[in-house]
Image (cartoon, helix red, strand yellow):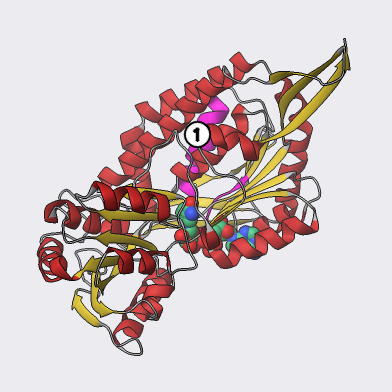
Amino acid sequence: MDTFSNLIGGEWTEGPGITENINPSNTNDVIGRYAQGDAAQANAAIAAAKAAAPSWARTNVMVRHNILKAAAAEIFARAKELGDLLAREEGKTLAEGIGEAGRAGQIFDFFAGECLRLAGEKVPSIRPGVEIEITREPMGVVGMITPWNFPIAIPAWKIAPALCYGNTIVIKPAELVPGCAWALADILKRAGLPDGVLNLVMGKGSVVGEAILSSPDVDAVTFTGSVATGKHVAMKCAEHMRKVQLEMGGKNPLVILDDADLDIAVDCAVNGAFFSTGQRCTASSRLIVTEGIHDRFVEATIAKLQSLSVDDARKDGTHIGPVVDAKQLDTDMNYIEIGRGEDGARLAWGGERLNRATPGFYLQPALFTETSNDMRINREEIFGPVATVLRVKDYDEALAVANDTRFGLSSGICTTSLKYASHFKRNAEAGMVMVNLPTAGVDPHVPFGGRKGSSYGPREQGRYAAEFYTTVKTAYQLA
Ligand code: NAD
């Protein structure tokens, strides 16, 4: 079986430990053996990134462009193989895995272009004979800590802008999905990235992640993951007065009004709530439905769910793959019990464990009806294929319920009314708003991020990524 090492200072380096990467569709299938780094390896990686930083910051933008462009080309060319690896280690369907790999390629492509569009400003001074220049400089060493649910897209949307703007990197991917991050590091190394510019240290959050957070030599930290870990990351960064960017959880509402096109509404709800096994920070976990369409919507949604196949992520015809691991499956089952028990909601469909040909973490998507917004299943992020329906009187109540959450990542509405669509776009308390589209599913070249408890710090992706990966300098000169 293949063994995969950490990348430190340009050298593939064995870890002090090793872990098996297991396929959640078939727990007998071991994908590979991956290094488990420790604090010493993390510190060596940080030292390598620090040593490489001055030279990379000055590297010709055409060289940076060429490296990112070559990485994009290889990702596109290998999208099927990388998508298969992704489906095998995370449990997204093969089509979703290939789509996500393609998206990683698009992100590298976009930032390859951005390398050649870096610009500053020249501004007149109020003092005679003085010139002012405003420029952006790299942050230096960026620490990256990523979650398991987008194993290639999230590392890509952090690595590509960091390199574009001249930073060096130490990345620690989630324990459950080291394969895609390793593949990206391998691609970038072969694309010509100088030694030390990108360092990959796989391992535990409590060990490798903590070492990154504790090092005075890390200039900025970008984190995607849960709220609890995010808070810890922010506190540790505050100790160092260090720039931090956090993307965290969601409890995203999808409002369905009486005048909605029923087919579009059901497609948006089923896609947004259950595709990728509901394991998306942008998943539509609360379906807020006005009275006039409520019963038709619930009936049509259940009919659609009945037609979906939950099975091995890489099997032809599978619509929904397994839950990522036993721990997440326990969490999902626990919330289904809370919904039925202490919350007193009605489990209208699904929620049972399923057996398939191979041992995996299969769960029938669960739809709760007769729920209220104060129930735990409507307040806490579950992060699985579990959605609720909230019956509301009218648009005003729908908007109020949609905004009544501590999260604010994505928010959607299905309606044929221009008035309500426009009002919702203006008044939804979320970083991203979708009209007649699922709350999940975003473009790679525009800002991504949320408000309230979902995000902290500057946005990711698109040109807005510069806000995090650069620091602004204002230079005055007597001409
Ligand atoms: P998590 O918080 O458990 O782990 C995220 C990362 O943090 C992992 O790499 C983990 O090893 C690391 N980590 C854990 N403890 C640490 C510590 N003490 N110090 C440093 N690092 C540590 O999250 P997860 O279960 O991997 O991901 C699921 C969560 O991610 C969900 O809440 C989901 O909503 C969120 N998410 C958010 C977005 C977004 O962009 N808003 C995108 C995807 C996922």
Q: Nearer the viewer, residue 399 or 70?
A: 399
Amino acid bearing label 1: Gly
Secondary structure under tag 1 reads helix
Snapshot quadrant of residue 403? bottom left
Span colored in magenta: 171-190
- Magenta-span inclusion, residue 179: yes
Q: Is residue 363 above or below residue 158?
A: below
Q: Is residue 92 visible?
A: yes
Residue 327 lies left or right of residue 258; in this view the side is right
Residue 294, given in percent of the width and then of the height, sits at: 16, 69
Q: Please report the residue visible at 27 percent of the width from the left and 46 percent of the height from the top.
A: 94
Q: Nearer the viewer, residue 78 or 5?
A: 78
Quarter occupied by the C terminus: top right
Residue 317, given in percent of the width and then of the height, sits at: 15, 50
Residue 441 lies left or right of residue 124; in this view the side is left
Q: Is residue 3 above or below residue 467?
A: below
Snapshot quadrant of residue 301? bottom left
Q: Which secondary structure is most common in the magenta stretch?
A: helix
Q: Nearer the viewer, residue 425 or 326?
A: 425
Report the residue that reaches farthest toward the top: 479
Q: Is residue 437 visible?
A: no
Q: Please report the residue visible at 54 percent of the width from the left and 63 percent of the height from the top.
A: 453
Residue 144, given in percent of the width and then of the height, sits at: 61, 47
Residue 376 lies left or right of residue 188; in this view the side is left
Label 1 crowd (10 A; few <14 / some 14-19 / many >=20): some
Q: Please report the residue visible at 21 percent of the width from the left and 71 percent of the height from the top.
A: 355
Please give the residue where the numbered disc 1 appears in the rendered image. Answer: 462
- Magenta-span inclusion, residue 176: yes
Q: Please report the residue visible at 61 percent of the width from the left and 30 percent of the height from the top.
A: 163
